[in-house]
Image: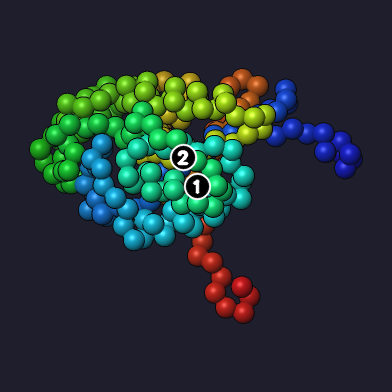
C-alpha cells in the first residue's frame, strides 16, 4: 500500500467520520479499599483517588475530548473535575449516570453480602435478573444511563469524542446495551479498575468496543533514561 493511499483511511468506520465515547470510572474511595458496596451512597475520593484522577486526566486530555458528562455523585464529579481543569470544558452532571442502586446491600462489605444474602448474590452472578438488596435491575440501570450517553454523543461534531465519567457497574451495563449484547452476557465484560476507561467507536454497523480497562500503564521510568 502506498503512503498516499494510507492517508485515505478513516478511523473506526469505512463509511465516513466517526464519533468516539470514552467511559471513565472514578478514582479510588475508602469504600473501594474496604470492599464495601457503594451503589448510590455518596462517597468521596481518597488522596490516592485524587492522584489517580489527575494522572488519568493528563492522558485523556491528550485525546482532545469535545464534551464531558458525569454522574453527580462526588466520586465521579471530582474525577471529572480534574479533566475539566486541563481541557477547559464544562462538565454536565446527570443523575442518570449514577451507580446501580442496591438497597440494603449498600454499605455492606463483600463478605457481609455473602453471609446475609448469599443466595441472591449467587443468582446475580449466574446472570439472573436480580434486584440486589431490593434495588435496581441491571437492565434498569442501562435503561437510564445509555440514553443519556447516546443523547450527548449525538451532539458531538464529526469524529468528536465524549468522555463519560461514571461507575463500574453503570459503565458495564451501558457498554453492554450500546453493543447490543443480551443482558445475560454483560458479566462477560470485565470490571474497570479505578480511573481506567473503555472506548467505544461508531462503526458501520453500530458501536464497537475499541479498548477496555485502558489506563493500567506501568510506572513511569525514574532515572537517567527518563
- Please tell me how crowded label 1 is: few (under 14), some (14-19), or many (20+) other residues with Cα within 10 Å: some
Relative placement, left or right, of 60 versus 118 is: right
Of labels 2 and 1, earlier in sequence is: 1
Q: Secondary structure at mark 2?
A: strand
Crowding at dot 2, Cα within 10 Å, few <14 / some 14-19 / many 20+, comes out as many
Q: Position of residue 120 (x, y in %)?
A: 17, 30
- Residue at the spot 82% in from the left edge and 34% down from the top edge: 8
The image quadrant that residue 160 belongs to is top right
Q: For the N terminus, which image quadrant?
A: top right
219, above or below 166, in the image: below
Quarter of the figure with the C terminus = bottom right
Q: Residue at x 50, y 41 (%)?
A: 90
In percent of width and height, residue 166 lies at 39, 38
> Are the residues tagged 2 and 1 within 8 Å (C-beta)?
yes
Foreground: 115 or 152?
Answer: 152
Give the residue at mark 2. Answer: 91
Q: Secondary structure at mark 1?
A: helix
Q: Is residue 48 left or right of residue 109?
A: right
Examine the rendered structure and indicate whether residue 213 appears above or below residue 30.
above
Q: Nearer the viewer, residue 25 or 185?
A: 25
Rendered image: mark on residue 44: none
Q: Which residue is mark 1?
A: 84
Most extreme residue toward the bottom, as rendered? Answer: 224
Amino acid at each position: 500500500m502506498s503512503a498516499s493511499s494510507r492517508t485515505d483511511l478513516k478511523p473506526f468506520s469505512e463509511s465516513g467520520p466517526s464519533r468516539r465515547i470514552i467511559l471513565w470510572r472514578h478514582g479510588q474511595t475508602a469504600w473501594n479499599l474496604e470492599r464495601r458496596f457503594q451503589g448510590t451512597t455518596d462517597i468521596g475520593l481518597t488522596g490516592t483517588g485524587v492522584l489517580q484522577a489527575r494522572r488519568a486526566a493528563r492522558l485523556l486530555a491528550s485525546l482532545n475530548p469535545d464534551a464531558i458528562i458525569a454522574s453527580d455523585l462526588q466520586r465521579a464529579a471530582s474525577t471529572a473535575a480534574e479533566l475539566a481543569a486541563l481541557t477547559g470544558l464544562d462538565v454536565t452532571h446527570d443523575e442518570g449516570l449514577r451507580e446501580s442502586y442496591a438497597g440494603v446491600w449498600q454499605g455492606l462489605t463483600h463478605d457481609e453480602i455473602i453471609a446475609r444474602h448469599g443466595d441472591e448474590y449467587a443468582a446475580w452472578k449466574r446472570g439472573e435478573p436480580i434486584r440486589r438488596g431490593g434495588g435496581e435491575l441491571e437492565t434498569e440501570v442501562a435503561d437510564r444511563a445509555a440514553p443519556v450517553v447516546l443523547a450527548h454523543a449525538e451532539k458531538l461534531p464529526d469524529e468528536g469524542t465524549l468522555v463519560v465519567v461514571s461507575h463500574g457497574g453503570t459503565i458495564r451495563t451501558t457498554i453492554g446495551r450500546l453493543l447490543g449484547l443480551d443482558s445475560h452476557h454483560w458479566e462477560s465484560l470485565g470490571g474497570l479498575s479505578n480511573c481506567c476507561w473503555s472506548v467505544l467507536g461508531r462503526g458501520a454497523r453500530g458501536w464497537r468496543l475499541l479498548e477496555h480497562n485502558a489506563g493500567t500503564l506501568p510506572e513511569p521510568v525514574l532515572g537517567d533514561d527518563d
